[in-house]
Amino acid sequence: MSDSKPLSKVEKIAIASSALIIGVGIIYWFSQVMNVIELLEMAYG
Amino acid sequence: MELLPLSFFEWAETSFLGYIGKNYGGIYATFGQSLHLISLAVLGGSVLVSDLRLLGVLLKDVPSEVVADQAHKVFRIALIFIIATGVFMAAAIAQKLFYNAAFWAKMYALIAGILFVFLVRRPLLKGDHSQLNPLTVKLVAVASILVWISVAATGRWIGFS
């Protein structure tokens, strides 16, 4: 694999969409974990 | 935010598929749940094999193009079974699913995953991987694993919410 070539259009789209998926995924699952932690604190102090 | 109106789910539950799923537990368990979970396992396996190869974790002695091509063939078949069995299972409890946040999270994740695979990942990987930036390939692999784990996790979550 070569990393010296300029990125093609397909690669740029792949990077942007991958970054979007990873970003949204991290935010979504982080918020779900925080909700569980909040619920556990309400239940058990 | 719901993708389809409640009236559609009300209709689905009274449809032929909804009737079969609701009244014949054996058919629901066999052709619905069992095939759905097996298909998800096959799809997850194809995703993991392909993406972990792209990340350089396994099958290093096999060209990544070969692994990606073979895994994609399996992926497509598993996806067809997942959607078919998923529609059947959903029809039986359609109105309940409409009010289930995990169901909509799964639908969004599934749509994102399908669009990502067929519009981004496959066009990127169908050529010579040596011509691609290695960081781009690894980023795509991580995103692919994340989106399909999200589909599986939110899918199982439906049963517990």
Image (cartoon, rainbow, N blue to C red):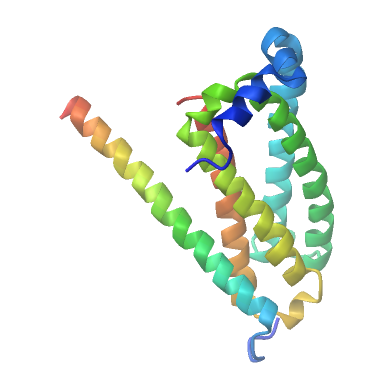
Left or right: B137, with B60 as reference point: left
Depth check, front residue: A38 or B89: B89
Q: Is residue B107 visible?
A: yes
Across and down, in percent, residue B38 comes to: 73, 31
Residue B7, compared with residue B154, is above or below; it is above
Residue ID at (58%, 73%) = A15
Residue ID at (68%, 44%) = B44
Residue B147, compared with residue B104, is above or below; it is below
User: Where on the picture, by quarter, is residue A37?
Assistant: top left
Depth check, front residue: B99 or B8: B8
In the rendered view of the protein, which quadrant contains the C terminus of chain A? top left
Residue ID at (55%, 30%) = B6
User: Where on the picture, by quarter, is residue B36?
Assistant: top right
Residue A31, compared with residue B86, is above or below; it is below
Q: Can residue B63 be seen in this view?
A: no
| Count of numbered labels shown in the rendering | 0
Across and down, in percent, residue A33 comes to: 35, 43
Across and down, in percent, residue B157 comes to: 50, 32
Q: Of all residues shown, which one is farthest toward the left?
A: A45
In the rendered view of the protein, which quadrant contains the N terminus of chain A? bottom right
Residue ID at (39%, 55%) = A27
Across and down, in percent, residue B19 comes to: 72, 13
Q: Of all residues shown, which one is farthest toward the front?
A: B7
